[in-house]
Image (cartoon, helix red, strand yellow):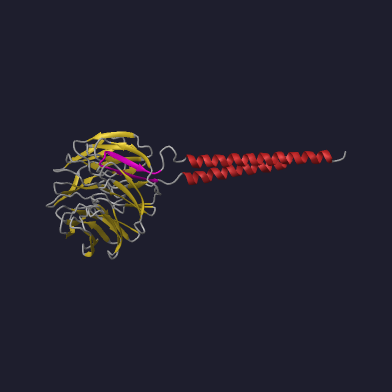
Amino acid sequence: MKKTLVVLIVGLLCFLMCGAFAFEVSGSQSSVDWPMFHQNLTHTGYSTSTVPDINSTSWTYTTGSSVYSSPAVANGTLYVGSDGGNIYALNATTGSSIWTYPTYGSVQSSPAVANGMIIVGSDDYNVYALNLTGGSVWNYTTNGAVESSPTIANGTVYVGSVDGNLYALNESTGDEIWAITVHGAFDSCPAVFDGIVYAGSVNGSIYALEASSGALIWSYPTSAQVESSPSVANGLVFVGSEDGGVYALNSLTGALVWKYETDGGVSSSPVMVGGIVYVGSSDSSIYALNASSGDYVWSFTTGGPIYYSSPAVADGLVFVGSSDDNVYALSASNGSYVWSYATGDEVLSSPAVANGRVYIGSDDNNVYAFGVSSGSSALPSVLTYAIIIVVIIVVIALVAILYLAIRGRRQERTPI
């Protein structure tokens, strides 16, 4: 009898230990951040995170002014700017305010987070570097509004200004390393790959520059201003132009590989995932194009122009905002409608996807988080596990009681 009970207890303990280990592995998912515009240095706009399949909001945060800036998410904190001139740090899970830093102009630039610093531009002509507590580290003053989103690579901050300069700044000090001047504002966010910086200018050209010196490698002219940010993948640079074209250029030579004509200007920034380029147009549609040939794959028409909102791709879905006030989730494979959410005004901000949520700003003064409710992220798993443990304990107890009852009856029947 004692031996049987010992076996049962040891079995129960083994089950609990294995279950706890399994829960820890499955419950502690690796962090999937979105630390800068379009996720990384090459602007792939892709996340390995899971995503919500319904338009349920996890939280909203009201800034008091339009949110053109696109969120960055790193280490559980969301960073975003507002038209009111503030830079916000919010808890990415709950949406609660952590700190606010005021500038003296609209913040349309999207923050970049690296090495314990948040770097972002403002229409007050400055590039700001803040620490994780919202304290100032340095600021660099240009001669025009900084609506370009910074890109941080190898200790250098690359960012454009309306003054017609593309700057390379020391990440730690803000000192200027180099600047290249063209006849036209740099509004697009630079992409960096293999020692080359790619950026578009409102003068209509796309530039490839040496990252270390700013020396010109090549430039390619389009027929209208380029506010779209380049995306680099598979030896190609994908970028849009207000002439309605989506361009694919050879990343080393700048030679045109293909061009796709939409029916509106393309200020939206392309992303390439799985051999498909996704991009929005002011003709109200989001397009999926073959990355190698530029051939049409599918398109989805929203109720208004897609201006600066640039697609994000994760978990088989494409997310984008539209001036029809909606945020859309579409099937990446065929463009079919999955869900949408109506905000209170047009959506110029680009979505960020991190740790199971989709984040985006709207001109209705709000930042939205779509996904698991902030109060229930891990509770179902914990509760389910606890119920299983209780059930197992009850079953083992019943078995033990039944065993004792049977054992007792047998002893009663045994003759003395």
Residue placed farthest to the right in the image?
Answer: 416
The part of the chain drawn in magenta is: 355-371
Residue 70, visible in the rendered structure = yes
Above or below for 237 versus 325: below
Where does the image place residue 207, in percent across and percent down from the top left?
19, 56
Question: Residue 138, percent across and down?
Answer: 23, 38
Q: What percent of the width, then of the height, locates residue 134?
A: 28, 35
The magenta stretch spans residue 23: no
Quarter placement of the C terminus: top right
Find residue 205 and report its image quarter: bottom left
Q: Residue 214, relative to residue 139: is it above or below? A: below
Residue 180 x %, y %? 15, 51
Q: Nearer the viewer, residue 271 or 266?
A: 266
Instruction: Tell which residue pokes out farthest to the left in this image.
Output: 183
> Residue, x 27% and y 61% (percent of image)?
236
Quarter of the picture containing the N terminus is top right
Front-most of residues 371 and 302: 302
Identify the residue at image location x=20%, y=45%: 147
For the image shown, how many numbered marks are present on the structure? 0
Classify residue 216 by image quadrant: bottom left
Is residue 114 visible in the rendered image? The answer is no
Position of 360 compared to 201: left or right? right
